Image: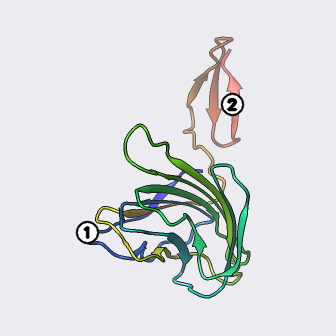
Amino acid sequence: MAWERLAHVELSSAGDTIDSGTITAKENLKVIIFVINSGAVRTGIRFNSDSGNNYAHRRQVNGGSDATNVNHNRIVADTDVDGSDYTVANIINKSDKEKLIRIERIHQSGSGASNTPEREEMVGKWVNTSDSITSIQAYNAESGDFGVGSYITVFGGSGDVVTDTTDDGSIFEESDTGKHYIWNATSNTWSEIA
């Protein structure tokens, strides 16, 4: 599958929401969120601006115990943090199915080499079974802001099968045997050249 960039939105002023804007519905989505904090932030993810209690997720920080949230108004992608963090989410986006999400996040956790970053792993879902995801919002639920330069990037890919095209008369050399083959586009076959 080839990924196509559907959206990239970067904040030019501090704020509490980074919105992808309308994107083309694709069966597979990859979302990258980079947050530069300005005070305490807690990044949540919403789809199609849905702020209802239509999300559930399970997460762990640094390999610790699982924590869960059900009937929630967003997928919480990190803990209350002071420092930059980088989030990658992979989403299956079938309109008639719940949207399943796998998230990995790295948080700066203090500057300098004496502070190790923390990691968070999460799975979640958006229970909507009548719409595809056509916009994604990173949402801050704490008192600080997403700082200037924070961004969201969305990539999409379809599950369609893509076949390579070969022109009639193309020649292929098998590297281990040295044999040569010619392509016949009418019969869709390779024939050995004597």
Q: Disc 2 on helix, strand or loop?
A: strand
In this rendered view, identify the residue nearer to me: 167 or 186: 167
Say which quarter of the image contains residue 101: bottom right
Q: Which mark is residue 190?
A: 2
With respect to residue 13, does 188 lie above or below? above
In this rendered view, identify the residue nearer to me: 172 or 193: 172
Whichever of callouts 2 and 1 sits on the residue coming sooner in the sequence is 1
What residue is drawn where x is 49% and y is 42%? 116
- Disc 1 marks which amino acid? Ser
With respect to residue 71, does 76 lie above or below? above
Q: CA distance from mark 2 to mark 1?
A: 56 Å
Residue 25 on image: x %, y %: 56, 72
Q: Position of 67 compared to 30: left or right?
A: right
Q: Nearer the viewer, mark 2 or mark 1?
A: 1
Q: List the residue tagged with mark 1.
A: 12
Residue 131 on image: x %, y %: 63, 82
